[in-house]
Amino acid sequence: MQRFKMVILAMMAVFALGATMAATASAGVEALNAEGKASAVKFSGTSNKVTKLTILKSERTVECSTTKTEGELEATGKLGPFHLHFEGCKTDIGGECTGLGDAAKTILALGTLHLATNSTLTVGYILFLIEHLHFTCTIFGLAKLVLVLGELLCEATPVNVLTATLTVTCKKGAEKGDPAVTSYENDKGEAATLTNALKASETDATEEMAAEEGEGVVTLTPEAKLDI
């Protein structure tokens, strides 16, 4: 009888461990506060490094000299809204680029962000879901309307440590308009691929793949750990 009880207790321990591991795995990527709990986090920062937008089959590159970032993660520590204010925007051969309704040489991008990682759980990503935005670039007196929409994956560092700042880096692939990363593991711990990767169109042209290059540091309030 004693041996039977020990077997039952061992099985219960195994089931309890399995439940704990499943709960941990299902937590996915999240921002944790100093107490190790999922937390709401605000972030903001200004980058004076040039941000570039490239479009497949387009000779032009849109360049913005300053990027101001504002946003927050909701109480789940997984997702929230963002505002990106691109300033000093022009093409690589000159001419101003301005968002519809925005101040001259300024483009405002709005949307929602989600935390993510890679398949080996070694890299932190921010998945930006960008709402439709329009801006006009005027070159030699000719105005060209540009539409941008879709999803963008950018790397976030550091991960798995409590920090007051995050460095967010967006990269392109080998060619213009080629995003560097399209596959990831989402905040639910599920393998995923961008279903609506970043795209852009010029005037009435067909939408083509687009990529963004840029880097900036944002301050987190309160301090948080990007836990993957």
Image (spheres, rainbow, N blue to C red):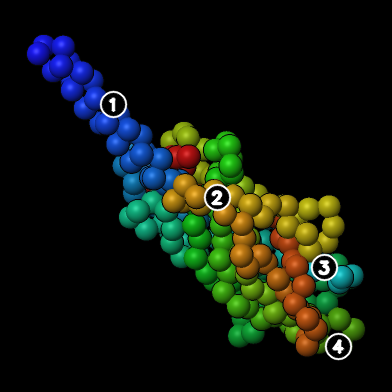
Q: Is residue 11 above or below residue 68?
A: above
Q: Report crowding for label 2: few under 14, some 14 to 19, many 20 or more residues within 10 A (C-alpha).
A: some
For image coordinates 46% across by 65% down, the residue present is: 81
Give me the C-alpha separation between circle 4 and circle 3.
Answer: 21 Å
* Residue 193 position within the rendered picture, expressed as x and y whole percent measured from the top left: 61, 57
Give me the C-alpha separation between circle 2 and circle 3.
Answer: 26 Å
Front: mark 2 or 4: 2
Instruction: Give the residue type that dot 3 points to.
Output: Leu
**Closer to us: 196 or 64:** 196
Residue matched to label 2: 191
Give me the C-alpha separation between circle 1 and circle 4.
Answer: 70 Å
> Going from the N terminus, do you reach mark 2 or mark 4 first?
4
Give me the C-alpha separation between circle 2 and circle 4.
Answer: 44 Å
Element type at marker 3? loop
* Residue 133 position within the rendered picture, expressed as x and y whole percent measured from the top left: 63, 78
Q: Quadrant of residue 87?
A: bottom right
Judged from this view, the residue extending furthest toward the top is: 2
Q: Are marks 2 and 3 in contact (CB under 8 Å)?
A: no
Residue matched to label 4: 142
> Going from the N terminus, do you reach mark 1 or mark 3 first?
1
Residue matched to label 3: 56
Element type at marker 4? strand
Element type at marker 2? strand
Residue matched to label 1: 14
Residue 157 visible from this viewpoint:
no
Instruction: Give the residue type that dot 4 points to.
Output: Leu
